[in-house]
Amino acid sequence: MARRARALIARLGGAACLLAAVASVACAPGRAEESGRVLRFWGLGREGEVVKDLVPEFERENPDIRVVVQQIPWTAAHEKLLTGFVGGAPPDLAQLGNTWIPEFAAIGALEPLDARAAASQALSSGDYFEGIWKTNLFDGRLFGIPWYVDTRAMFYRRDLLEKAGWREPPRTWSQWRAAMEKVRGPAGEGRYAILLPTNEWEQLTILGLQMQSPLLADDDTRGAFSQPPFRTAAEWYVGLYRDSLAPVVSYTQLGNPYQEFSRGYVAMWITGPWNLGEFRRRLPPELQDTWMTTPVPAPDGAEWPGYSWAGGASFAIFRASKQKDAAWKLVEFLSRRQIQTRFYELSGDLPARREAWDDAPLAGDVKSRAFREQADRLVPLPRVPEWEQIAQKLAEDMEAAIRGRETVPASLSRLDADVDRILEKRRWILSRRREEPRGR
């Protein structure tokens, strides 16, 4: 583990400065340190700000615990959490993107939570969406408790689909393709059917999961993108650009996607739950009744809704914490049904607990209903520490096929080669583990 930690520091490049910053925060005196039992919680982005509004109630219920919340931007969070762990100054409790759980668990940073969850009267695995709960497992052990759900569903212009003859959103890929062709109309007239930014990996990954691609093969040590399931999804996906159903633009090239959606440049967009609020704020009043959401269509012959991937954020207790019991109390508090509902009202983040969806305001929000339906059809992404590197390579390597510079099989072959290089250390570690019993 120490060798791995040193390797992480080398990868960070600039870790020394961050370590100094972490140390200065850890050593800075303040009223919290004077109060006795201090619990340090690192929250990320907007959630780190919102959670501060929930902490006073927890402190009233637990007057012997003082919670110090440190808000960290998402862009700096991964690096700061790593350097905090390596430098011996991690938080007691932190919000982690659930795709980060395998990495931090693999390096020994996190406390296993199986025993605490099994003994808890406040939460159990059955309270959560199955796909989201699974994202917190690594090597068969539980290292996080889901806080909120992030996945993708399809936003669409209901008026434009109805004008094209579709009173209900498509449910299968063949229906989807037919609807896109009708909505776009004759090619070359400056309209498209769907927005699929070329620099995003999420949409193609969803299609691959729907075709039951494992994404990775051989015990998650090699890429499986050239295999038939993912290749079929990629051919279908790239065909949308080739046939001018999706504009060949990155997210930054598009400018203002809300404006383009409003003017009918695109009529569909696979995106996340944060856009429920953005659409309400950014689309003009006269269009508020024209947009709706639906789960992602499924391959022909498959069960609807189609699968999407399980994302979001979780609570994780750091192994080095001396306040594990207090940290678990805060996890249980923030996981309560009514607190999850309040957190949604404050942040717009969708609850990870099923029962919170039965409370107002979510129960009466027809536009969020697609995400509730989708949450029952989620698949965890590969639980390897290298997944984020792999996801970035997926977007980069597929762009050549999207732009017509090479075939889909050629792009997928290159992607598999890149993924194999990324996973080289994983293969080495697993081979050493297999050899260990024979060497004893």
Image (cartoon, rainbow, N blue to C red):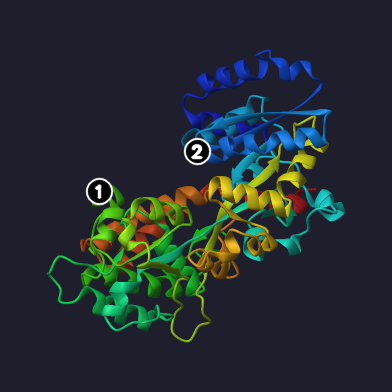
Give me the residue at 36% from left, 69% from top.
234
Distance from label 2 to label 1 (Cα)? 22 Å
Q: Is residue 6 left or right of residue 55?
A: left
Q: Residue furthest front?
A: 286
Q: Is residue 199 visible?
A: yes
Q: Which residue is mark 2?
A: 74
* Quadrant position of residue 331: top right
- Please name whichever residue, 107 or 3, is drawn nearer the observer in this view of the structure: 107
Judged by depth in the image, the label closer to the viewer, 2 or 1, is: 1
Residue 436, image x, y percentages: 73, 49
Residue 210, image x, y percentages: 49, 73
Q: Is residue 218 visible?
A: no
For label 1, the SS is loop
Q: Is residue 366 left or right of residue 145?
A: left
- Please name whichever residue, 421 or 178, is drawn nearer the observer in this view of the structure: 178
Above or below residue 389? Residue 32 is above
- Please name whichever residue, 96 or 420, is drawn nearer the observer in this view of the structure: 96
Q: Residue furthest left?
A: 188
Give me the residue at 45% from left, 74% from top.
229
Give the crowd class for mark 2: few <14, some 14-19, many >=20 residues within 10 Å. Answer: some
The quarter of the picture where the N terminus appears is: top right
Q: Which residue is mark 1?
A: 255
Q: Amino acid at mark 1?
A: Gly
Residue 150, image x, y percentages: 53, 56
Tag shown at residue 95? none
- Mark 2 or mark 1: which comes first in sequence? 2
Above or below residue 15? Residue 213 is below
